[in-house]
Each structure stands twice: as structure tokens, then as C-alpha cells.
Image (tube, rainbow, N blue to C red):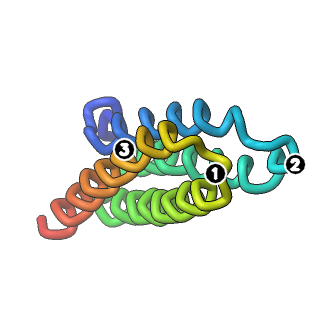
Amino acid sequence: MRDHTKLTAFLKADELALEVYRITRSFPQEEMYALKSQIRRAAVSVPSNIVEGCSREGEKEFVRFLDIAFGSLRELSYQVSLSNRLGYLSPTDYQSIAPLLTETEKVLGSLIRKIRSS
């Protein structure tokens, strides 16, 4: 069993989830059960799937959960972009989360490639 707290991918994903909760607090009330909820679920899915993958014994299962986390991360990236274009995010909030999304994608993608190549 792996210790997820030692994975940079998990630490970045966890930081991202916290930032998503912070920036979505100001979304319009009518988005409470729509885009706001979707964004938060996708954000929590990323570190959650990394944690679950770490609890699996085989590399194949581990990578499967990392792939799911990566899919949620791409979904989140689109949802954040959409929120920005709809005017739900302030320029400051968008500028704070966009680089974090990119960095998390790079780190998680690199981890997936590293495990697949070994």
C-alpha cells in the first residue's frame, strides 16, 4: 500500500480542491445545485481517486484510478473555463486557479506515464 500523502500529485490535487471550494463560494445562488456542485464534485474526485488507487495492491489498478483522477481533472478544467466565460469567477480567482490546474495535470500525467513505463 502506498502513502498518498507522499505523492506530489495528491498534494497538488488536494490544494486544487481547497482552492475550488474557495473560489466557488461566490457563485450565483441559482448555480448551487448545477455548475457549482459539478465543479466541487470533480475537484474532490481527483484527490479521492488518487487516495483510492494508493490503497490498491497492483500497479494496473493503481494506474486505473489515476486515469479516473486525470479524467476528473480534465472535466474540472473545462468547468472552470466555462465558469470564467460565464462571469462567475473574478479575474483574480481565475488567475489563481488556472496555473494550479495546469501544474496538477502535468504532475499527475507524469506520474501516470512513469508507472506505465515501469
Figure quadrant of residue 35: bottom right
For the point 63% across and 51% down, which residue is it?
39
Assess whether mark 1 and mark 3 are in contact (beta carbons under 8 angstroms): no
What is the CA distance from the residue labelled 2 to the residue labelled 1? 14 Å
The residue where tag 1 is placed is 39
Q: Quadrant of the N terminus?
A: top left
For the point 57% across and 41% down, which residue is it?
90
* Apparent side of residue 53 relative to residue 111 in the rendered image (left or right): right
What is the CA distance from the residue labelled 2 to the residue labelled 3? 27 Å
Q: Secondary structure at mark 1?
A: helix
Q: Is residue 91 above or below residue 108?
A: above
The residue where tag 2 is placed is 30
The residue where tag 3 is placed is 100
Q: Amino acid at mark 1?
A: Ile
Nearest to the eye among marks 2 and 1: give it: 2
Sequence-wise first label, 3 or 1: 1
Residue placed furthest toward the bottom? 117
